[in-house]
Image: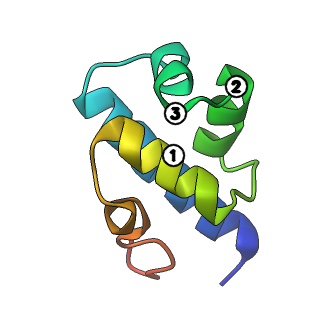
């Protein structure tokens, strides 16, 4: 699978959870202690995110990190 597809799928998962919680990228950035432009680039699949930042985002969204990775890399997703 292409790297761009994996990054894009992960970014979509982050955005889905963020939208379900009705919070802005700015608020997610604040909660996760990451920059808003970083969150934006993750959601657009332009950032190869590190594992510690996955956990920061998951904590901010109040989900398990595994939830963010669910279906990522699945060719049917």
Residue at the (75%, 50%) spot, across then down? 47
Between 71 and 56, the one nearer to me in the picture: 56
Q: Distance between the residues labelled 1 and 3?
A: 5 Å
Q: Choose the circle earlier in sequence order: 1 or 3.
A: 3
Circles 2 and 1: CB atoms closer than 8 Å: no
Q: Where is residue 62 in the image (x, y as percent from the top left)?
A: 27, 42
Which of discs 2 and 1 lies nearer the camera? The answer is 1
Q: Distance between the residues labelled 3 and 2?
A: 9 Å
| Left or right relative to 53: residue 73 | left
Crowding near the residue tagged with mark 1, few <14, some 14–19, many ≥20 C-alpha atoms within 10 Å: some
Mark 2–mark 1 Cα distance, whole angstroms, equals: 12 Å
Of labels 2 and 1, earlier in sequence is: 2
The quarter holding residue 76 reads bottom left
Marks 3 and 1: in contact by CB < 8 Å? Answer: yes
At x 31% / y 63%, what residue is drawn? Answer: 67
Q: Is mark 3 on a helix, strand or loop?
A: helix
Query: What kind of element bears circle 2?
Result: loop
Mark 3 and mark 2 in contact? Answer it, CB < 8 Å: no
- Say which mark, if any, is on residue 9: none
Direction from residue 56 to residue 5 in the image, left or right:
right
Residue 42, position as x, y percentages in the image: 64, 44
Q: Which residue position holds label 1? A: 56
Q: Label 2, on which residue?
A: 35
Residue under the point 46% across and 71% down? 72
Q: Position of residue 24 (x, y in %)?
A: 44, 16
| Colouring | rainbow
Label 3, on which residue?
32
Quarter placement of the C terminus? bottom left
Q: Residue at x 53, y 19 (%)?
A: 30
Q: Is mark 1 on a helix, strand or loop?
A: helix
């Amino acid at each position: 699978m292409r790297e761009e597809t994996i990054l894009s799928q992960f970014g979509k998962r982050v955005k889905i959870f963020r939208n379900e919680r009705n919070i802005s990228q700015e608020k997610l950035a604040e909660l996760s202690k990451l920059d808003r432009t970083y969150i934006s680039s993750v959601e657009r699949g332009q950032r190869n995110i590190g594992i510690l930042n996955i956990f920061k985002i998951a904590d901010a969204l109040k989900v398990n990190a595994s939830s963010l990775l669910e279906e990522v890399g699945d060719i049917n997703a």
